[in-house]
Image (cartoon, helix red, strand yellow):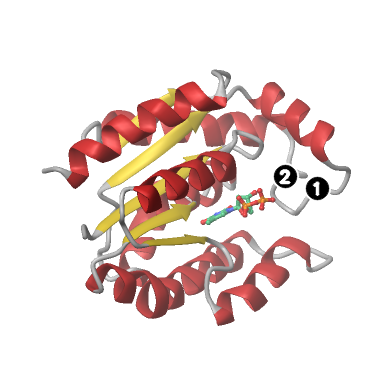
């Protein structure tokens, strides 16, 4: 049993949920108890907040948007993530505070350092042990989304420049914390990506 907090980050359409599912399966085969979760929407309150933030019609002021993601995070960490880590489980989570820094900080051009501070306050300082960044060019992400469905949520509907800023912000975050991040080219085959992810997680489990 190893308490470990792994997050997956990247643009929409990068393949985060596919990799989260493959990682969960592999960890379970190794006998780990896994909590697979996501933000926004990984808690009871979060399900309601997710609906508001992604699908409520009409404008939401950027600072209000940042605060709703932070509220979702605060409740999720306090009621779901921390208890699981305290039970010695591996938490595999789709999106966490780096999403806020990239989307609200760089995408919405709020101040990234302030957004990071807000997120850390919400999460009482909890940082992941490992963050997997599935890096994908904006146009390729868009192509994949178009192929999979027709309805965009509030963030997906943003312009190409928004998503380019998000991608650049992610890469800067990874540069700033090379020990926490594993950056992978999301164009590679899913099973190859899964293998690289397993190798890195294995090091953390056996440490
Ligand atoms: P996600 O659940 O990954 O979308 P989907 O299920 O459609 O693949 O995330 C929903 C959107 O929320 C995504 O476009 C990114 C955005 N987001 C932020 O802007 N800030 C945040 O802090 C988080 C967690 C997500």
Locate residue 63: give its quadrant.
bottom right
Q: Which residue is drawn at 31% across and 55% down?
A: 31
Q: Residue at x 51, y 71 (%)?
A: 72
Is 121 or 178 nearer to us in this picture? Answer: 178
At which x and y percent is residue 99? 49, 49
Quick one: which residue is furthest to the right in this view? 150
At which x and y percent is residue 38? 52, 60
Quick one: which residue is furthest to the left in this view? 207
Please tell me how crowded label 1 is: few (under 14), some (14-19), or many (20+) other residues with Cα within 10 Å.
few
Residue 152 numbered tag:
1
Dot 1: what SS? loop
Residue 52 numbered tag:
none
Cα separation, mark 2 vs mark 1, equals: 5 Å
Q: Which residue is drawn at 45% across and 73% down?
A: 76
Q: Is residue 121 above or below residue 27?
A: below
User: Which residue, given by chain and number where applicable, does mark 2 sit on?
Assistant: 156
Is 38 or 121 nearer to us in this picture? Answer: 38
Q: Is residue 46 left or right of residue 170?
A: right
Q: Is residue 196 left or right of residue 192?
A: left
Counting the numbered discs, the total is: 2
Q: Do the residues labelled 2 and 1 touch (CB within 8 Å)?
A: yes
Q: Is mark 2 within 8 Å of ligand 1?
A: yes
At which x and y percent is residue 74? 41, 74
Q: In this view, does 35 lie above or below 11?
A: below
Please tell me how crowded label 2 is: few (under 14), some (14-19), or many (20+) other residues with Cα within 10 Å.
some
Look at the image and tell me in which quarter the N terminus lies: bottom left
Q: In this view, does 17 lie above or below 35?
A: above
At which x and y percent is residue 107? 58, 42
Dot 2: what SS? loop
Does residue 202 appear in this view?
yes
Q: Which residue is drawn at 40% across and 27% down?
A: 195
């Amino acid at each position: 049993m190893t308490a470990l907090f792994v997050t997956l980050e990247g643009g929409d359409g990068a393949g985060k949920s596919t990799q989260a599912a493959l990682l969960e399966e592999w960890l379970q085969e190794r006998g780990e108890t896994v909590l697979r979760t996501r933000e926004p929407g990984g808690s009871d309150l979060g399900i309601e907040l997710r609906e508001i933030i992604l699908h409520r019609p009409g404008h939401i002021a950027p600072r209000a948007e940042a605060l709703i993601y932070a509220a979702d995070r605060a409740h999720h960490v306090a009621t779901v993530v921390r208890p699981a880590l305290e039970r010695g489980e591996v938490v595999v989570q789709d999106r966490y505070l780096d999403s806020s820094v990239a989307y609200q900080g760089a995408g919405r051009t709020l101040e990234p350092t302030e957004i990071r501070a807000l997120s850390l306050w919400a999460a009482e300082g909890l940082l992941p042990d490992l963050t997997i960044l599935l890096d994908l060019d904006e146009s390729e992400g868009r192509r994949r989304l178009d192929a999979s469905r027709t309805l965009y949520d509030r963030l997906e509907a943003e312009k190409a420049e928004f998503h380019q800023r998000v991608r650049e912000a992610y890469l800067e975050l990874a540069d700033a914390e090379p020990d926490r991040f594993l950056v992978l080219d999301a164009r590679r085959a899913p099973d190859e990506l899964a293998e690289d992810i397993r190798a890195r997680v294995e090091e953390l489990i056996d440490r």
